[in-house]
Image: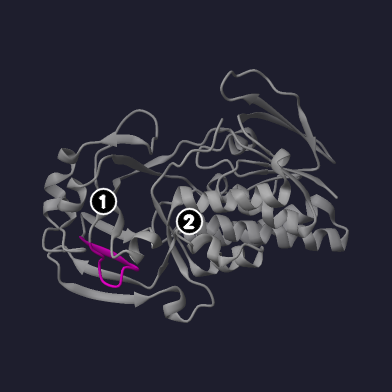
Amino acid sequence: MAKTVVVGGGIGGCAAALALHRAGADVIIYEAAPELKELGAGINVQAVAVSVLTDLGIPLEKFHAPSEGDAIFTSAVEYFTAEGFFISSEKVGLAAGASQPQLSAHRAKFHSTLLAECLRVLGQEKVILNSRFTQLESFEDHVILHFEKTTTKDPMPPVRCDFAVGADGLKSRVCRALLGDGAPRYTGRMIYRGLCEVEAIHADGCTVSLCGHENGNFICYPISEGMREKGQFLCNWGLCVLRTHPGGEEKWTSEATLEEIREELEEFGGNRFAGLTPLQLAERTEKIIGWSLFDRDPLESFDFGSVTLLGDAAHPLLPYGSQGATQAIMDAEALGVSYQNAMAKGTGIRGCVKEYSDLRCEVTGKERT
């Protein structure tokens, strides 16, 4: 049984740990966060990725129950002009005939469901927090990973393993250790995001809604099954607009003000979601986050011997079309399958990494275009 270290305990890292454990690996997760807080806003997870998670043994109800994941079973995506004229709609998930639903969820609650399963399956001692990756040494038959305490920067004892998976997100330290710094390119767009509560539901209470024009668009969708059952709407909304280069470092947690986007929200005033315009939804929002969108070139390979990358560490995706979490989970499935195949064939960790790279590198590069 190969000792496997997953660097990063986010959605992709947890899914990878579960898939590898199910395939027979001895898995341990190292996560930089000193404690796991409820951060983030809404995400959509496509039905194909939900199928992966249920196949890994997580009951669907864990994601859906209001007392646990509290996710909505998304029924449709609808499109409107900036003036509010209906363009089209498409069914998704169960409504489209899929075997599993598409989920609209609060990112923190979705992640907490995955983390709870990792703690149950792997054991508390196999999920180590406050451990920031610093460097690696790769050898023919093993890898040595170095970490420091996130809070104090004190070095931790080196960790020797047979297989290392970098699932440490957009600014992956593992990717940087393997390939050096790669400068991101600014896309010319910025997303503003927020959460608010509304005393009514929009449509069936399970619909993703978009409106916009060539210079910007607005999206909103429900992310609480518990509130939907009460006839209410926990609304996750986002506004994507053109912006000049923000300068400084790439960030996705900068607080913004309503005045920065008021004029652009007013352009979509012909639309009503649960009876409110996009501006009125934003006016109900306690905290607005601004995220400048940067892009990166896809990697030519995920094959680094006994080391590989997964999720945003491997293929950073812009936050469109429910791609990020979905593709990270699909990576995890492919990695588990590749591990199981390699162990059966006797090709070892290097055979696993090669098969995984062949399965996922090209397809995730295409997903970005």
Q: Where's residue 67, x and y in %?
A: 48, 56
Q: For the point 65% across and 62% down, which residue is it?
A: 359
Task: Please tell me which residue is depicted at 56% across the width and 30% down the height of the picture.
Answer: 34
Q: Residue at x 28, y 39 (%)?
A: 287
The residue carrying pointer 2 sits among few (fewer than 14), some (14 to 19) or many (20 or more) residues within 10 Å by Cα, namely few
Would residue 274 be visible to someone looking at this image?
yes
The residue nearer to you, when weighing 14 against 90, is 14
Picture coordinates of residue 207, whole percent (x, y): 32, 68
Which residue corresponds to mark 1? 239
Q: Count every numbered label the image shows and give the total.
A: 2
Residue 79 position within the rendered picture, expressed as x and y whole percent measured from the top left: 26, 69
Q: Which residues are magenta?
A: 200-212
Judged from the image, the secondary structure of the residue bearing numbered disc 2 is loop
Query: Is residue 210 located in the magenta-colored stretch of the structure?
Result: yes
Residue designated by label 2 = 67
Label at residue 351: none
Say which amino acid is labelled 1. Leu
Question: Which kind of residue does numbered mark 2 sit on?
Answer: Ser
* Mark 1 neighbour class, 10 Å CA radius: few under 14, some 14 to 19, many 20 or more: many
